[in-house]
C-alpha cells in the first residue's frame, strides 16, 4: 500500500508539470490578453486609450514576451518562492486573493456536501429497500425536481421570495453591517441566516445524484446471494443492509469523492454569482473573462493539483472500503 | 406621461438659475455667469473668489462627525483646515445638514468609477449651465492663442492628510511623474502634449509662486480646460516621493515594499497602484471623501475628508455626508433586489432602463424615487465603412445605402416596443441641452420610409436579388448576396438585445441580409482591433458636452465603434497593418481637417462653429446610424436625500455627479448613520 | 414486486405467492425483451414519463404546426400580455365554443406597466386547423396551417392581429407558448449525441483501464486526470472565438458540445473502472477466464451486463445534464443566444427580477425543463429496473 502511494505520488509530478503547461496555454487561447480586455473595458467607459499606451503597458506586464518566457517566469515564482504571481485586475498577489475567499467557499461547500450526503444516503437506502412504495416515489420525485431545476433560476426565485415575503435581506453571506466587521458571535449568527439559502438550494440540486446512485447500487447488491445468506443466518434486516450492501453501494461515492476536493473550492459558481456569494467560483470566472492570466492560471493549476491529489485519495479510499481492489 | 418629460436645455437652465440664485444669495459680489469666452476675454472671477459673508474671521461650521476629534485636539479646528478662501459650492435645492451615509453598489475593481467620479476632484468643474468654473483653483487665465494656461490655487488648501498643497506639488508631479520616462515611456499621456509624431511636444510647467502655476504648450491647447475637470495635476510630493527610487529617502525600503506587495518593479507599483487613492487608501488627495479600504473588498467604504476645501454658503464645511459605502455585486439581479428593497440610497450607475416599471412600482415600498435624468446614451448601428471586405466596404461607403438603411428603421416602433417609449427617435447627436446641440443632425433621415429606402437601394445599384429576396452586390449572375453581422455585447433579454433583433428584421424587410450576434467582450475587442468587424449595434454617449469629450466618437476615434477606424489608423500610422487609405473625397478627411482647426481655435464660439460644421457633415453623410437617443439615466434616490435633481448624465460631466455630490444631504441624518 | 428483498416479502399475503407461481409459468416462456417490458410496465411513473417524453418530442418535431405564431412575431400591442383567458361562457351567460375576448391595452401613466383589459364586445372563437402566419414546414413546403388559433382578420398587419396566447406574451409581445415549443426542438435534440459519445468512449476506456489494471490502468488514469484538469470555460471561450462568425449560432453550439463531450467521457470511464476493479476478482469472471473466453467477450458478455444498471442510472442523469448545461452556458453567456431559441436562451432572458415581478408566465420554459428532466430520470429509472440482471 505504502509503495503504491509513493509510486502514485512520483507519477503525480510529471502529470502536474504537463497540466501546468496546458493550463497556461489554454487560458491564453482566447483572443487578446488582459490589456486588450482592460483597454476595451476602459473604452466601454468612454476613456481614451491609444495603442501607444497599450504598447507601453504590455511591455510593463511582459505580455509581449513569448509564451514560454511568461510560463517560465510564472512557474519559477511558484516553485522557488511560492509566489503565484500578481493579479492584474485586482492588484494583489494571487495567493492573498485565493486565501481571502477560501474560508467562505469551504464553509459553503462542506456544509452543502454534508447536508447533501446526510439526506442522500439514508433516503437512498430507504428507496432501495422500499422500492415502489409511495415514499420511494415521493423521494424520487422531489430529488429529480432538484436535478431539473437550474440552480441559478431557483436562486433568484428564492431570493425574491425571501425578500418580498419573508422580509429578509438577500444577496451575499452577510448583512451589510457585518461585511467588514471582525468575526464575532453576532456575525456567525448573521452568516447562518444567509447560509441556508445557498445550502438548501445546493442540497436540493445535489442530493438526487447521490440518492439515485445509492439506490441503484444498493438494489444491485440486495439481489446478491450473500445478502440472502445473511438473511438466512437470521441477521436482522437493519444489520444485513447496513453492514455489507450499503458499504458496497457507497463504493462510487468514494471513487468520486476525491474530485469533490476541487469542487469544494470552485463549485457552485453560477449559484454564487446569482446569490452574490463572494466565493472562489465567481472570482475565477471574472479572472477568466478579464483574461487576468496569473490569477486564472494559478487558480486553475491549484484546482488541477487538487483534482490529482483527490483522485489519489479516492483510490486509497476505494481500496479501504472495498478490500477486493488490489493495489498494484 | 410624467416619465416622458423631456429636458430641454432651457428647462435645465431654469433649474440651474433657481439653484444658482440659492448660492448667490449668500455671496457677494454675484458669481459671474461665466460665458464660455470668459476665460479668454478676461481672467475669470469666480464666485468663490470672495470669502463668505463675514469678511473678518469667517464663521465656519464644524461637521458634527469631527467635533469630538477637534475637541480632543486630534484634529485642528475647521478654520485651520480650510483654505483661506474656500470653494463655496452651489446647491441644487438648499443648504443642508451634515451627517449620515449613503449606500451604493458596484461590480468590482473594474467598476471603480461610481466612487472615483465622486472623489476625483480637480481644478475646475461644470456649473449648471455646463460651463467650466473654478472649483479647486481660485481662478485661471489663458492667453489669446490658448498656449499658456495659468492657474491660481486657493491659499491654504490641504491634502487629505493635512499637509498644505502648493504649486510645488504640481512641479513635483511634472518632474517626477508626468515626464518620467520610466513611468511613461514616450510620454504616453496625450493630455500633456501637443502635436503628433515629429511635432509632438510636452508642455512646460512653471510655478512663479506657491499658489500659481503655468502650463505652456508649443501649440494652442484650447480644450485643456475640459481635461482639468477630473484630471489631477499635482502629486502629494511629501508622500509620493517615497515610491520613486530617485526621490525616496531609503530606496531599499521601497524595493522591499514593492516585493511585499507582489509587484515586480517600482514603476509597476507606482503606476498601477500607488498613484490611485482607490488602490492606495493612504494616498492623500482632495476629494470630499477618503477611502477607508481599497476597492478589493466586498464593501468599499469612503469617509469624510476633514480637509476638504469647500463649504456651503452658510460656512458649513462640505461634504454634508459623513461617508459612502459601495457594496459588491456580481449579478445585476441582486442589485435590482437591493434597489427595490430600498437598500441603495443613491445610484444611476448600472440601473437599467428596462427595469423602469419594476423600479417605479416599488417606489413606495422601497422608500425611494426614480429620478429620470436625460442621458447621453444613444443606440447606434455602426457600419464599418473601412471594412477589410471590399464589397461590403463599397456598399457601406455608399452614402445612399446608409441613408436608405436609416430610412428602413422604424424608430418609433423600436422606442415603443423595446424602450417603453422612454427614448427619443434621433440620430447620434448632441443632446438638446448641449451647448453643441445640432437640430439638423438630430433629425436627419429619421423618418420611417421603407419604400423610399427600397428605391434608394435599387438606384444605388443593389437592385438584383437572390432566390430568398435578398439584395446582391451587383446584378451579375454570380454576384454574392450582401450579408453582414452586427456584433453587440448586450445581455440576454435586455431591451438593447431585443432592439438589435428588431433592426435586423427591418433591414431584411428592405432586402438587406444581416444578423445581430452577441459576442463576448474579448472577441468583440479582437474584432475591431484587427478590423474584422462588419458592423456593430452598440451604444454611443458623450453627447452632453461633446467638445469636452474631444469629439471622440464624432471623429471615429473611439475604436470600439469602428465606422472609419481603419482610415483613422492610416492617418496615425500608415504602416499599421490594419490601416486603409481613405478615398480623396472621403468625409473623414473633412472631419479631421475641421477638428484640427477646433484644436487650435481659442475662441469658444469659433470652436462651436467649427464643431457645428463637423456635425453638418454628419447630417449629410450619416457616418453612424442612430436609432434612439436621449435614453434616460434612471437615478434611484432614497426619499429624504436632498440636492439632487434631474441633471444630464454623461461620462464627461461626471455621470450622476454633475451637481456636486458634496452637497447631497439627508433631511434627517440621524436615520442614516449606517 | 418480485425484486423486493426477502425481508419485505415475508410479510406478504399468501395470495401473492400464488400469483407469483402463475406469473412464473408465463415467465418461463417469455423472451428477455418481453420480460423487460413487463418489468418496465410496473414502474408507473416511468411509463407516464415515456408518454410525456414522446409528447414533448412530437411537439418539438411539429413545432411550427403546433404553435399558433412565429417565434419572432413581436408586437407592441401584446407586450407582457398575461395568458389569454379561454372561455366557454360569454358575458351574457351563453355557452359557446371556446373563445377569447379582444383585449384593450393601456399603460399605467406612472409606472408604464402595460394593463390589459378584456373587451367583451369582441369575441374571437378559437379554431383548430386554422390559418395563421405562413411558415415553411421542415423547410419543405410553405403553409399557414396551425393546430389552433383565432381567425386572421383581413387587412391588418401581423403585429395587430388578435391573438390567443395560452401562456401569455413576453416583454416584446412574443407568444410564450410558441417560444417554448420552438425551444424544445433545440433543447431536446442538441447534446444527445454528446451524451452518447461520452457514454461509448467512457465504457470502452474505463473498461480497459479497470480490466487490465497495471500500467495500462495507470496510464489511462493519468490521461483522464489530465483531461479533467483542462479548464473548460476558457476552452469554450477560445473555441467560440475560433469558429467562424458567419456560422449559424446553432452549428457553433453543436460543434462545441461535441468537442466537450470528448472531455465528458472521463466521468463515466472512472465509474466503470471502479466497478471493473472490484468485479474482476469475482468468481464468474475467473471462471469465464478459465473456460477460455476472450477478453472482449469477458468484458462485453459477462462484465458489462453486470453493471448495466449503473450505467443506465448514470446515463439518465447525463441526458438531462446536457439539457441543463445548455441552460447554464446560456446563463454565463457562452451558450446559445438570440435569435436562436432554446430553453436555455429563454431562461437566460427571463432570469431577472422584472420577469418574476411583472411577467411570471415567461418562466414556462423552466417548467418544460424541469418536467423533461424529471421524465428522463423516471424513464431511466424504469429502464434500469427492467434491465436489472439480478432481479428474479
Image (cartoon, coloured by chain):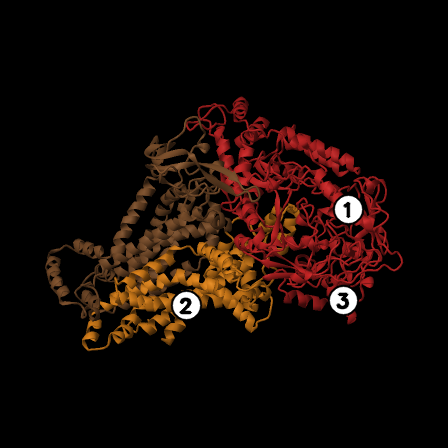
Quadrant in the picture for the N terminus of chain C: bottom left
Q: Verify CB contact (< 8 Å) between mark 3 and mark 2.
A: no
Q: Is residue B312 above or below residue C218?
A: above
Viewer-nearest residue: B307 or C202: B307
Please tell me the colour of chain A: orange
**Residue A282: numbered disc:** none
User: Disc 2 designates what residue?
Assistant: A115
User: Disc 1 designates what residue?
Assistant: B20
Going 13% across and 55% down the picture, which residue do you hit? C30
User: Image quadrant of residue B606?
Assistant: top right
Going 35% across and 46% down the picture, which residue do you hit? C189
The secondary structure type at the circle numbered 1 is helix
- Compare marks 3 and 1 and give the one earlier in the sequence: 1
Residue B9: give x, y in percent of width and height.
70, 38
Residue A266: give x, y in percent of width and height.
47, 62
Chain identifier for the red-coloured part of the image: B
Residue A208: give x, y in percent of width and height.
36, 61
Chain name for mark 3 = B
Chain name for mark 1 = B
Quadrant in the picture for the C terminus of chain C: bottom left
The residue carrying pointer 1 sits among few (fewer than 14), some (14 to 19) or many (20 or more) residues within 10 Å by Cα, namely many
Same chain assignment for discs 3 and 1: yes
The secondary structure type at the circle numbered 3 is helix
User: Disc 3 designates what residue?
Assistant: B67
Viewer-nearest residue: A28 or C174: C174
Left or right for B145, reference B382: right
Viewer-nearest residue: B376 or B605: B376
The residue carrying pointer 2 sits among few (fewer than 14), some (14 to 19) or many (20 or more) residues within 10 Å by Cα, namely some
Please tell me the colour of chain C: brown
Viewer-nearest residue: B352 or B674: B674
Number of the front mark, 1 or 2: 1
Same chain assignment for discs 1 and 2: no
Amino acid at each position: 500500500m505504502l509503495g503504491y502511494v509513493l509510486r502514485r505520488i512520483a507519477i503525480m509530478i510529471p502529470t502536474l508539470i504537463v497540466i501546468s503547461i496546458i493550463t497556461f496555454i489554454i487560458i491564453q487561447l482566447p483572443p487578446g490578453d488582459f490589456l486588450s480586455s482592460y483597454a476595451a473595458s476602459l473604452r466601454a467607459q468612454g476613456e481614451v486609450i491609444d495603442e501607444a499606451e497599450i504598447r507601453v503597458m504590455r511591455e510593463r506586464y511582459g505580455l509581449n514576451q513569448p509564451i514560454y518566457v511568461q510560463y517560465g517566469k510564472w512557474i519559477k515564482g511558484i516553485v522557488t518562492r511560492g509566489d503565484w504571481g500578481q493579479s492584474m485586475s485586482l492588484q494583489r498577489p494571487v495567493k492573498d486573493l485565493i486565501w481571502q475567499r477560501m474560508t467562505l467557499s469551504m464553509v459553503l461547500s462542506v456544509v452543502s456536501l454534508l447536508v447533501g450526503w446526510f439526506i442522500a444516503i439514508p433516503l437512498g437506502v430507504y428507496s432501495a429497500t422500499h422500492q415502489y412504495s409511495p415514499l420511494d416515489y415521493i423521494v424520487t420525485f422531489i430529488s429529480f425536481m432538484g436535478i431539473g431545476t437550474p440552480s441559478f433560476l431557483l436562486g433568484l426565485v428564492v431570493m425574491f421570495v425571501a425578500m418580498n415575503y419573508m422580509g429578509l435581506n438577500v444577496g451575499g453571506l452577510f448583512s451589510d453591517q457585518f461585511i467588514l466587521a471582525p468575526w464575532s458571535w453576532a456575525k456567525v449568527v448573521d452568516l447562518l441566516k444567509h447560509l441556508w439559502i445557498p445550502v438548501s438550494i445546493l442540497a436540493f440540486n445535489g442530493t438526487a445524484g447521490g440518492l439515485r446512485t445509492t439506490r441503484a447500487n444498493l438494489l444491485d447488491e440486495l439481489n446478491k446471494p450473500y445478502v440472502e445468506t445473511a438473511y438466512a443466518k437470521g441477521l436482522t434486516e437493519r444489520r444485513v443492509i447496513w453492514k455489507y450492501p450499503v458499504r458496497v453501494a457507497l463504493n462510487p461515492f468514494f471513487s468520486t469523492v476525491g474530485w469533490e476536493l476541487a469542487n469544494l473550492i470552485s463549485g457552485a459558481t453560477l449559484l454564487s454569482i446569482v446569490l452574490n456569494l463572494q466565493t472562489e467560483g465567481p472570482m475565477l470566472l471574472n479572472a477568466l473573462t478579464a483574461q487576468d492570466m496569473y490569477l486564472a492560471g494559478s487558480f486553475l493549476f491549484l484546482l488541477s493539483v487538487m483534482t490529482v491529489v483527490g483522485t489519489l485519495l479516492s483510490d486509497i479510499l476505494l481500496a479501504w472500503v472495498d478490500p477486493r481492489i488490489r493495489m498494484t | 406621461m410624467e416619465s416622458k418629460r423631456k429636458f430641454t436645455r432651457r428647462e435645465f437652465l431654469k433649474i440651474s438659475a433657481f439653484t444658482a440664485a440659492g448660492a448667490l444669495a449668500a455671496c457677494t459680489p454675484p458669481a459671474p455667469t461665466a460665458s464660455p469666452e470668459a476665460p479668454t476675454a478676461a481672467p475669470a472671477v469666480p464666485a468663490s473668489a470672495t470669502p463668505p459673508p463675514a469678511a473678518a474671521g469667517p464663521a465656519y461650521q464644524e461637521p458634527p462627525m469631527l467635533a469630538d476629534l477637534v475637541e480632543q485636539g486630534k484634529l485642528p479646528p475647521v478654520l485651520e483646515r480650510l483654505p483661506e478662501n474656500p470653494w463655496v459650492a452651489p446647491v441644487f435645492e438648499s443648504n443642508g445638514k451634515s451627517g449620515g451615509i449613503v449606500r451604493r453598489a458596484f461590480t468590482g475593481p473594474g467598476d471603480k468609477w461610481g466612487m472615483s467620479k465622486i472623489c476625483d476632484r480637480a481644478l475646475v468643474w461644470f456649473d449648471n449651465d455646463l460651463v467650466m468654473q473654478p472649483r479647486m483653483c481660485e481662478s485661471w487665465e489663458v492667453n489669446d492663442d490658448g498656449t499658456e494656461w495659468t492657474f491660481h490655487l486657493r491659499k491654504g488648501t490641504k491634502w487629505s492628510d493635512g499637509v498644505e498643497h502648493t504649486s510645488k506639488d504640481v512641479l513635483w508631479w511634472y518632474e517626477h511623474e508626468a515626464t518620467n520616462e520610466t513611468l511613461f515611456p514616450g510620454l504616453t499621456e496625450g493630455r500633456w502634449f501637443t502635436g503628433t509624431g515629429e511635432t509632438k511636444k510636452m508642455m512646460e510647467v512653471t510655478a512663479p509662486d506657491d499658489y500659481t502655476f503655468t502650463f505652456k504648450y508649443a501649440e494652442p491647447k484650447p480644450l485643456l480646460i475640459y481635461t482639468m475637470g477630473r484630471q489631477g495635476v499635482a502629486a502629494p510630493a511629501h508622500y509620493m516621493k517615497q515610491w520613486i527610487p530617485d526621490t525616496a529617502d531609503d530606496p531599499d525600503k521601497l524595493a522591499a515594499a514593492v516585493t511585499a506587495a507582489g509587484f515586480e518593479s517600482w514603476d509597476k507599483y507606482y503606476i498601477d497602484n500607488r498613484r490611485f487613492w482607490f488602490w492606495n487608501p493612504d494616498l492623500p488627495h482632495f476629494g470630499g471623501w477618503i477611502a477607508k479600504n481599497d476597492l478589493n473588498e466586498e464593501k468599499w467604504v469612503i469617509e469624510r475628508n476633514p480637509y476638504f476645501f469647500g463649504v456651503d454658503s452658510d460656512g458649513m464645511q462640505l461634504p454634508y455626508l459623513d461617508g459612502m459605502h459601495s457594496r459588491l455585486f456580481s449579478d445585476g439581479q441582486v442589485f435590482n433586489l437591493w434597489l427595490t428593497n430600498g437598500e441603495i440610497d443613491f445610484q444611476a450607475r448600472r440601473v437599467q432602463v428596462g427595469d423602469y416599471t419594476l423600479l417605479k412600482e416599488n417606489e413606495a415600498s422601497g422608500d425611494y424615487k426614480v429620478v429620470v435624468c436625460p442621458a447621453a446614451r444613444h443606440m447606434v448601428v455602426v457600419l464599418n465603412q473601412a471594412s477589410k471586405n471590399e464589397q461590403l466596404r463599397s456598399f457601406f461607403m455608399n452614402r445612399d445605402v446608409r441613408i436608405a438603411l436609416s430610412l428602413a428603421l422604424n424608430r418609433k416602433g423600436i422606442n415603443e416596443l423595446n424602450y417603453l417609449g422612454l427614448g427619443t427617435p434621433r440620430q447620434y447627436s448632441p443632446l438638446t441641452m448641449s451647448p453643441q446641440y445640432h437640430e439638423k443632425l438630430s433629425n436627419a433621415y429619421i423618418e420611417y420610409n421603407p419604400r423610399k429606402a427600397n428605391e434608394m437601394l435599387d438606384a444605388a445599384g443593389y437592385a438584383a436579388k437572390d432566390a430568398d429576396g435578398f439584395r446582391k452586390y451587383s446584378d451579375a449572375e454570380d454576384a454574392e448576396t450582401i450579408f453582414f453581422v452586427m456584433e453587440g455585447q448586450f445581455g440576454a433579454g435586455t431591451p438593447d438585445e431585443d432592439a438589435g433583433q428588431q433592426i435586423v428584421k427591418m433591414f431584411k424587410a428592405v432586402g438587406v441580409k444581416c444578423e445581430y450576434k452577441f459576442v463576448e467582450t474579448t472577441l468583440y475587442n479582437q474584432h475591431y482591433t484587427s478590423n474584422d468587424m462588419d458592423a456593430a449595434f452598440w451604444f454611443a454617449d458623450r453627447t452632453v458636452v461633446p467638445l469636452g469629450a474631444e469629439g471622440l466618437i464624432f471623429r471615429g476615434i473611439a475604436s470600439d465603434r469602428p465606422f472609419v477606424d481603419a482610415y483613422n489608423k492610416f492617418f496615425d500610422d500608415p504602416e499599421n497593418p490594419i490601416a486603409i487609405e481613405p478615398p480623396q473625397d472621403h468625409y473623414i478627411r473633412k472631419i479631421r481637417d475641421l477638428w484640427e482647426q477646433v484644436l487650435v481655435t481659442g475662441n469658444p464660439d469659433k470652436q462651436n462653429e467649427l464643431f457645428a460644421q463637423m456635425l453638418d457633415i454628419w447630417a449629410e453623410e450619416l457616418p453612424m446610424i442612430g436609432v434612439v437617443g436621449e435614453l434616460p439615466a434612471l437615478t434611484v434616490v432614497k426619499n429624504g436625500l436632498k440636492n439632487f435633481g434631474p441633471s444630464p448624465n454623461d461620462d464627461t460631466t461626471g455621470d450622476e455627479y454633475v451637481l456636486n455630490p458634496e452637497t447631497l444631504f439627508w433631511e434627517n441624518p440621524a436615520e442614516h448613520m449606517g | 414486486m418480485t425484486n423486493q428483498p426477502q425481508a419485505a416479502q415475508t410479510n406478504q399475503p399468501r395470495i401473492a405467492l400464488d400469483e407469483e407461481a402463475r406469473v412464473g409459468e408465463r415467465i418461463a416462456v417469455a423472451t428477455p425483451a418481453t420480460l423487460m417490458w413487463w418489468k418496465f410496465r410496473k414502474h408507473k411513473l416511468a411509463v407516464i414519463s415515456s408518454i410525456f417524453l414522446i409528447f414533448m418530442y412530437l411537439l418539438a418535431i411539429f413545432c411550427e404546426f403546433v404553435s399558433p405564431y412565429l417565434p419572432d412575431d413581436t408586437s407592441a400591442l401584446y407586450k407582457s400580455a398575461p395568458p389569454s383567458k379561454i372561455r366557454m361562457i360569454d358575458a351574457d351567460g351563453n355557452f359557446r365554443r371556446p373563445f377569447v375576448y379582444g383585449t384593450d391595452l393601456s399603460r399605467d401613466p406612472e409606472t408604464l406597466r402595460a394593463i390589459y383589459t378584456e373587451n367583451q364586445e369582441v369575441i374571437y372563437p378559437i379554431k383548430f386547423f386554422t390559418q395563421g402566419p405562413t411558415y415553411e414546414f421542415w423547410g419543405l413546403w410553405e403553409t399557414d396551417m396551425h393546430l389552433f388559433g383565432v381567425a386572421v382578420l383581413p387587412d391588418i398587419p401581423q403585429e395587430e392581429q388578435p391573438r390567443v396566447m395560452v401562456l401569455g406574451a413576453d416583454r416584446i409581445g412574443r407568444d410564450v407558448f410558441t417560444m417554448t415549443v420552438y425551444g424544445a426542438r433545440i433543447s431536446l435534440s442538441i447534446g444527445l449525441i454528446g451524451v452518447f459519445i461520452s457514454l461509448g468512449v467512457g465504457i470502452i476506456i474505463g473498461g480497459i483501464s479497470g480490466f487490465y489494471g497495471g500500467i495500462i490502468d495507470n496510464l489511462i488514469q493519468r490521461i483522464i486526470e489530465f483531461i479533467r484538469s483542462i479548464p473548460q470555460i476558457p476552452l469554450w471561450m477560445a473555441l467560440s472565438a475560433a469558429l467562424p462568425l458567419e456560422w449559424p449560432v446553432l452549428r457553433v453550439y453543436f460543434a462545441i458540445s461535441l468537442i466537450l463531450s470528448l472531455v465528458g467521457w472521463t466521468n463515466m470511464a472512472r465509474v466503470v473502472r471502479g466497478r471493473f476493479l472490484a468485479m474482476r476478482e469475482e468468481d464468474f469472471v475467473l471462471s469465464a477466464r478459465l473456460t477460455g473466453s476472450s477478453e472482449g467477450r469477458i468484458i462485453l458478455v459477462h462484465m458489462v451486463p453486470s453493471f448495466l444498471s449503473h450505467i443506465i442510472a448514470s446515463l439518465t442523469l447525463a441526458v438531462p445534464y446536457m439539457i441543463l448545461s445548455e441552460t447554464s452556458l446560456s446563463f454565463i453567456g457562452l451558450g446559445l443566444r438570440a435569435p436562436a431559441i432554446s430553453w436555455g436562451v429563454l431562461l437566460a432572458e427571463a432570469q431577472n427580477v422584472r420577469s418574476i415581478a411583472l411577467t411570471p408566465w415567461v418562466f414556462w420554459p423552466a417548467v418544460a425543463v424541469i418536467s423533461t428532466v424529471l421524465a428522463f430520470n423516471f424513464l431511466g429509472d424504469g429502464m434500469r429496473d427492467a434491465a436489472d440482471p439480478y432481479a428474479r
